[in-house]
């Protein structure tokens, strides 16, 4: 078993959470992003919580645009008080509208008046013991990960749970309801977050009645196939039943040479994998997340959603 596996053997236990958190802004992509999160919540049988930080939007929504913009918004729950302003009312109306439009009628909606969006989302995810956070990416030239966007890049580095990032423009092609039975891809670079990401991908693959390909890429990722396949299968089995050592999950292991981001995308493209799971080494200050080059390259040029397990999430119960 890889050393990372011994240290984080139960990392996949964090997958069994009752909530998916979807962070949205006020862009036209929000409707598609909520649809993706809602379908994924249906497939995994989890609750969906849609969240918007009002003060983070460069465009304050109006009541008139609530029905036409697949928008977003952020307030404490659905409880409105007398001092709720028009922008909050409009944001709540838009959340209601978009949730109704995508068939997510039972989804929770939160409109947060102000605050740092990444911090707010992370706090909500931690408080709800979220299975994962669903985020869209957007270009932000002011950020060091400008092709990804500051909120998504910071969450991918420092969130307390996995983050599923859907690249801008990719949203209409992402259909989680069709993921069942399709093989997932996980990248393993020899690090603890990399192994934790493989654990998560294995658990997700079992939930989807799918298989998993683990691609070992990088100088520290040279491990024997049995040291990858068997520990992942055991991890999944123990999550389902601590007394059971058997699983139907099929795990394949590949050793790859070359640029890690390119190799992972090549593996995924060959089997039309619905997503790639990777670990982020990034544990950095909130204003300077250290994602690492592989994560940045995959996320900025993604052809499919990227599921990132932040190194920070291992400090929130991911290790055992």
Image (tube, rainbow, N blue to C red):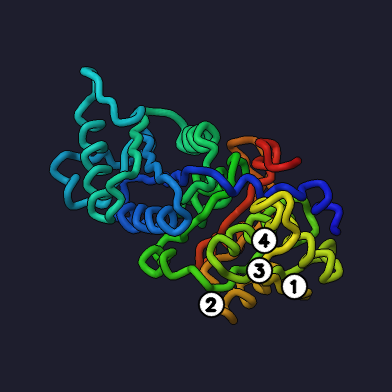
Q: Mark 1 — residue? A: 253
Q: Is residue 80 above or below residue 199?
A: above
Q: Is residue 29 above or below residue 132?
A: below
Mark-to-mark CA distance, 4 and 3: 31 Å
Tell me residue 182's x, y (percent). Answer: 53, 73
- Does the residue at mark 4 contact the one at mark 3 (Cβ under 8 Å)? no
Nearer-N-terminus badge (3/2): 3
Query: Is residue 38 or residue 296 the one in the foreground?
Result: 38
SS class, disc 1: strand
Q: Is residue 61 left or right of residue 14?
A: left
Pick out the residue farthest to the top. Answer: 82
Of the two numbered discs 3 and 2 in the rendering, the one whose residue sits closer to the viewer = 3
SS class, disc 2: loop
Mark-to-mark CA distance, 1 and 2: 17 Å
Pick out the residue farthest to the front. Answer: 243
Nearer-N-terminus badge (4/3): 3
Of the two numbered discs 4 and 3 in the rendering, the one whose residue sits closer to the viewer = 3
Residue visible at 66% across and 68% down in the picture: 248
Mark-to-mark CA distance, 4 and 2: 20 Å
Nearer-N-terminus badge (1/4): 1
Q: Is residue 70 left or right of residue 120?
A: left
Q: Mark 2 — residue? A: 272
Tell me residue 279's x, y (percent). Answer: 67, 54
Pick out the residue farthest to the bottom. Answer: 270
Q: Residues within 10 Å of mark 1 (few under 14, many from 20)?
A: many
Of the two numbered discs 1 and 2 in the rendering, the one whose residue sits closer to the viewer = 1
Q: Mark 3 — residue? A: 248
Q: Residues within 10 Å of mark 4 (few under 14, many from 20)?
A: many
Of the two numbered discs 3 and 1 in the rendering, the one whose residue sits closer to the viewer = 3
Tell me residue 58's x, y (percent). Answer: 33, 41
């Amino acid at each position: 078993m890889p050393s990372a596996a011994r240290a984080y053997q139960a990392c996949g236990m964090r997958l069994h959470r009752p909530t998916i958190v979807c962070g949205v802004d006020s862009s036209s992509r929000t409707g598609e992003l909520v649809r993706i999160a809602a379908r994924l919540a249906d497939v995994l049988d989890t609750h969906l919580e849609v969240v918007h930080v009002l003060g983070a939007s460069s465009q304050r929504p109006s009541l008139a645009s609530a029905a036409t913009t697949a928008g977003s918004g952020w307030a404490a729950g659905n409880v409105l008080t007398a001092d709720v302003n028009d922008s909050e009312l409009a944001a709540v109306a838009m959340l209601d509208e978009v949730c109704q439009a995508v068939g997510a009628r039972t989804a929770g909606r939160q409109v947060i008046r102000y605050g740092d969006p990444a911090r707010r989302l992370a706090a909500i995810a931690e408080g709800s013991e979220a299975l994962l956070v669903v985020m869209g990416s957007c270009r932000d030239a002011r950020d060091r990960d400008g092709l990804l966007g500051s909120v998504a890049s910071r969450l991918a580095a420092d969130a307390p749970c996995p983050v599923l990032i859907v690249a801008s423009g990719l949203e209409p092609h992402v259909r989680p309801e069709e993921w069942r039975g399709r093989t997932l891809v996980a990248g393993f670079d020899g690090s603890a977050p990399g192994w934790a990401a493989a654990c998560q991908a294995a658990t997700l693959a079992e939930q989807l009645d799918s298989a998993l390909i683990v691609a070992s890429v990088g100088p520290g990722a040279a491990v024997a196939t049995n040291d990858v396949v068997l520990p992942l299968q055991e991890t999944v089995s123990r999550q389902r039943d601590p007394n059971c050592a058997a699983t139907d999950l099929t795990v394949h292991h590949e050793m790859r040479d070359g640029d890690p981001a390119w190799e992972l995308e090549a593996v995924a493209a060959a089997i039309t994998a619905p997503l790639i799971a990777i670990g982020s080494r990034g544990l950095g200050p909130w204003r300077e997340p250290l994602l690492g080059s592989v994560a940045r390259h995959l996320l900025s040029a993604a052809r499919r959603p990227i599921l990132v397990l932040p190194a920070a999430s291992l400090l929130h119960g991911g290790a055992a």
